[in-house]
């Protein structure tokens, strides 16, 4: 706790920052999950099942893109369609956090951001962060599974005057094989809504598309108390129809590390974040650099 004596010593800037500070709904709790074991997370299974998982996922997000595209990106009531117009400026301004996140990680790890020319953004949504990325880098490849979201993103980029964004609608995971080589793969708040087998497939393919010397900056939840992913149980669940709300999934941290090693990615930094909004889970932001070519990958 900050004492009254110390508070008086804050600079004018510091006092202004303090005045704007609000406690997070769920603060990071170091060690809070230390006494809880990792549940079973099954990554491998029949390829036809993973294809079905991805098809179910894309159907859900396309539908949400038609109903509540902005709320699907930032789940606050003020971003529902009925209230969005009066809150649009605040919504789009928040996309600047992407640049702050990227610049701070590169600076903190003494990496050259000037070497990054082409960026692949997985899950561009309605272009909230894409617009800022486009002003910072030479070329952006904006990827999403939802055509309604992509249409709104294109409109947003047109309004900002950028002409250096290529929008790609991902219909199957294998569509990523057609991407050009990129200097940075970036994704936050996106992978967590995919089943673990899909997360692993996406990472495998996107890591492959990195130039040697390129970077990966991505966020994934890695643990939740009581969470497990049982392949056959999930397949049965899919047979009941499209989910009613966004799912939250977790890939164990050791799996992420193994994937990075297999693709020649040196881990530069991993930090705990609050992106799941839950005190009983762990989410991590990973930052790595590809120092060698990917090793041959075994298909499921």
Image: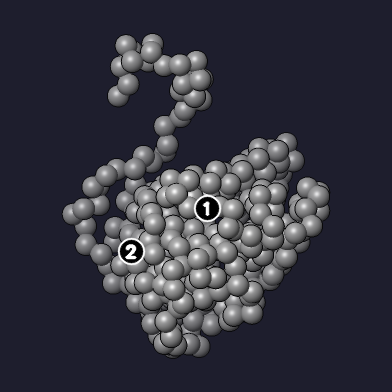
Residue that appears at 72% across and 57% down: 153
Residue that appears at 33% across and 58% down: 224
Which sits in the foreground, 233 or 163?
163
Q: Which residue is mark 2?
A: 253
**CB within 8 Å, label 1 to label 2:** no
Q: Position of residue 2 (x, y in %)?
A: 32, 21
Q: Position of residue 191 (x, y in %)?
A: 50, 63
Q: Position of residue 18 (x, y in %)?
A: 46, 23
- Which numbered mark, 1 or 2, is in the foreground of this view? 1
Residue that appears at 41% across and 16% down: 10
Name the side, left or right, on which 112 lies relative to 117: left
> Spatial distance from mark 1 to mark 2, Cα to Cα?
26 Å
Residue that appears at 63% across and 69% down: 145
Q: Is residue 132 above or below residue 138?
A: above
Hey, which residue is sitting farthest left in the picture? 35
Name the side, left or right, on which 82 lies relative to 204: right
Q: Earlier in the sequence, mark 1 or mark 2?
A: 1
The answer to whether residue 83 shows anywhere in this view is: no
The 10 Å Cα crowd at callout 1, few under 14, some 14 to 19, many 20 or more, is few
Residue 285 in which image quadrant: bottom left
Which sits in the foreground, 53 or 272?
272
The answer to whether residue 134 shows anywhere in this view is: yes
Residue 298 in which image quadrant: bottom left
Q: Secondary structure at mark 2?
A: helix
Which sits in the foreground, 139 or 280?
139
Q: Secondary structure at mark 1?
A: loop
In the image, which disc is placed on residue 112?
Answer: 1
């Amino acid at each position: 706790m900050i004492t009254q004596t110390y508070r008086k010593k804050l600079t004018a800037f510091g006092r202004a920052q303090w005045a704007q500070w609000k406690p997070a709904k769920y603060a990071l709790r170091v060690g809070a999950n230390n006494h809880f074991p990792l549940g079973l997370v099954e990554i491998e299974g029949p390829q036809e099942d993973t294809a079905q998982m991805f098809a179910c996922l894309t159907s859900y997000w396309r539908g949400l893109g038609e109903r509540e595209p902005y709320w699907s990106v930032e789940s606050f009531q003020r971003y529902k369609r009925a209230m969005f117009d009066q809150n649009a400026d605040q919504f789009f301004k928040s996309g600047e956090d992407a640049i702050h996140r990227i610049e701070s990680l590169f600076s903190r790890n003494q990496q050259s951001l000037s070497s990054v020319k082409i960026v692949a953004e997985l899950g561009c949504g309605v272009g909230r962060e894409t617009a800022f990325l486009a002003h910072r880098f030479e070329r952006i490849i904006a990827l999403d599974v939802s055509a309604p979201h992509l249409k709104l993103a294109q409109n947003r980029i047109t309004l900002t005057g950028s002409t250096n964004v290529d929008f790609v609608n991902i219909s199957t995971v294998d569509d990523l094989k057609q991407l050009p080589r990129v200097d940075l793969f970036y994704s936050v708040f996106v992978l967590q809504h995919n089943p673990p087998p899909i997360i692993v497939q996406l990472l495998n393919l996107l890591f492959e598309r990195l130039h040697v010397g390129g970077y990966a900056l991505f966020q994934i939840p890695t643990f939740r108390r009581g969470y497990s992913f049982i392949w056959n149980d999930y397949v049965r669940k899919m047979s009941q129809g499209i989910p009613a709300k966004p799912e939250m999934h977790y890939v164990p941290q050791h799996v992420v590390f193994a994937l990075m090693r297999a693709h020649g990615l040196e881990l530069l930094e991993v930090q705990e974040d609050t992106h799941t909004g839950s005190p009983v889970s762990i989410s991590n932001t990973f930052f790595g650099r590809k120092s060698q070519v990917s090793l041959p990958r075994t298909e499921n």
